[in-house]
Image (tube, helix red, strand yellow):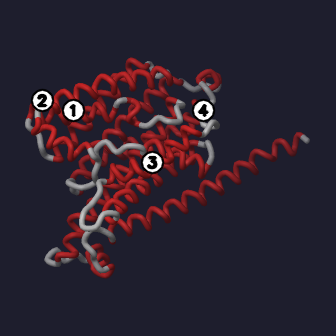
């Protein structure tokens, strides 16, 4: 009997690894199709041969190929980067707070970025997308620093402090916008959440921050498994819970800052993706993290492609479509009594 008990865990582990590899391969295949769709479809109808030619040997004198090179390729790359950041940030937030309906917005990061953008426009006259990038990044980092300092790494306290920061900053944003019409007109284009208006140099500037956040997320996967058992159990197993939450906080700042700077305050992607990953691979964060990395850009790019096609001769912003896609999932999560914690 002892032999059978000892043999069971390796068999279960092999099954878990096999399932994880299969799911990861499947999601990567789906992401490849979504990337192709992002390059091929848009308001302007372009022959697939022209799209392929624009990718392998572009002729910028050709109008169709110019659209692919100058608009669709940067848009797709930005969607990939922002989607990765959102998926991983949401996974880390839910893992650290053990809150199943948490996303980066819960910690006040979106509000911090929004206030920084508003103040930058109103006080400094910044109106360029490149300027918004660093304002959003700085605002997200400042909000996260406040939340993690006051929250002291405790899950409930983090959620409460994040809600308080959001409640404090939101009316301040509204106050500035109500007093300054020009600021409102500039801010509303960023606030809706979009993959347009930026180029590949933006991704290049933020790539080091994204890579650092990704590395930290993977390094934290095993620690999040222990944290999910509760602080007391994690401490008994030798984990420094405070250090884990501090490192996770740094990763969340990096990832959320990158996502918000690239695409604006996209809602629900960071909430939905970790739940989808758990449905596919179970509760092991060593698989949830890589699957979330792939599912994030799948959801964001799918929302962007749908936004290009759903209304003839115009577009819906990716943030709007993502909210429509994520809202039913949020309702299902809220109605599911089994989802009481992580």
* Lower position in the chain sequence, tag 3 or tag 2: 2
Distance between the Cα atoms at labels 1 and 4?
34 Å
Q: Nearer the viewer, mark 1 or mark 4?
A: 4
Residue 52, percent from left and from top = 31, 77
Q: Tags 1 and 4 in contact by the CB under 8 Å rule?
A: no
Residue at horizontal 46%, vertical 50%?
293
* Lower position in the chain sequence, tag 4 or tag 3: 3
**Element under disc 1:** helix
Residue 322, percent from left and from top = 39, 51
Residue at horizontal 26%, vertical 37%?
137
The outermost residue toward the right is: 1
* Lower position in the chain sequence, tag 1 or tag 4: 1
Quadrant in the picture for the N terminus: top right
**Element under disc 2:** helix
Q: Total marks drawn?
A: 4
Report the residue marked by disc 2: 179
Quadrant in the picture for the C terminus: top right
Distance between the Cα atoms at labels 4 and 3?
19 Å
Distance between the Cα atoms at labels 1 and 2?
16 Å
Residue at horizontal 28%, vertical 54%?
195
Q: Residues within 10 Å of mark 1 (few under 14, many from 20)?
A: many
Residue at horizontal 39%, vertical 41%?
213
Distance between the Cα atoms at labels 3 and 2?
33 Å
State the mark number for residue 340: 4
Q: Image height check: is 306 above or below 192?
A: below
Q: Residues within 10 Å of mark 3 (few under 14, many from 20)?
A: some
* Lower position in the chain sequence, tag 2 or tag 4: 2
Q: Nearer the viewer, mark 2 or mark 4?
A: 2
Q: Residues within 10 Å of mark 2 (few under 14, many from 20)?
A: few
Report the residue marked by disc 1: 116
């Amino acid at each position: 009997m002892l032999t059978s008990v000892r043999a069971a865990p390796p068999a279960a582990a092999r099954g878990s690894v096999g399932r994880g590899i299969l799911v990861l391969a499947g999601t990567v295949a789906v992401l490849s199709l979504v990337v192709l769709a992002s390059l091929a479809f848009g308001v302007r109808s372009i022959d697939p041969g022209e799209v392929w030619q624009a990718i392998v040997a572009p002729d910028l004198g050709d109008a169709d190929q110019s659209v692919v090179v100058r608009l669709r390729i940067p848009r797709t790359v930005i969607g990939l980067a922002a989607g990765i950041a959102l998926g991983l940030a949401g996974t880390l937030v839910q893992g650290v707070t053990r809150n199943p309906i948490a996303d980066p917005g819960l910690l006040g990061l979106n509000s911090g970025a929004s206030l920084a953008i508003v103040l930058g426009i109103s006080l400094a006259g910044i109106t360029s997308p490149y300027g918004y990038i660093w304002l959003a990044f700085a605002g997200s980092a400042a909000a996260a620093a406040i939340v993690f300092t006051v929250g002291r790494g405790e899950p409930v306290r983090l959620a409460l402090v994040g809600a308080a920061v959001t409640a404090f900053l939101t009316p301040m944003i509204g106050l500035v916008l109500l007093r300054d019409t020009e600021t409102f007109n500039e801010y509303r284009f960023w606030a809706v959440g979009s993959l347009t208006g930026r180029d590949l140099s933006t991704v290049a500037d933020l790539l080091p921050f994204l890579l650092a956040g990704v590395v930290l997320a993977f390094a934290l996967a095993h620690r999040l498994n222990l944290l999910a058992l509760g602080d007391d159990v994690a401490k008994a197993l030798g984990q420094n819970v405070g250090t884990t939450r501090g490192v996770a906080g740094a990763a969340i700042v990096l990832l959320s800052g990158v996502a918000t700077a690239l695409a604006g305050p996209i809602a629900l992607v960071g909430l939905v993706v970790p739940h989808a990953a758990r449905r596919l691979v179970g509760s092991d964060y060593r698989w949830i993290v890589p699957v979330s990395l792939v599912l994030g850009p799948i959801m964001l790019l799918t929302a962007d492609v749908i936004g290009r096609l759903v209304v003839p001769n115009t577009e819906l912003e990716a943030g709007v479509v993502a909210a429509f896609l994520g809202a039913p999932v949020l309702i299902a999560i809220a109605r599911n009594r089994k989802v009481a914690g992580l």
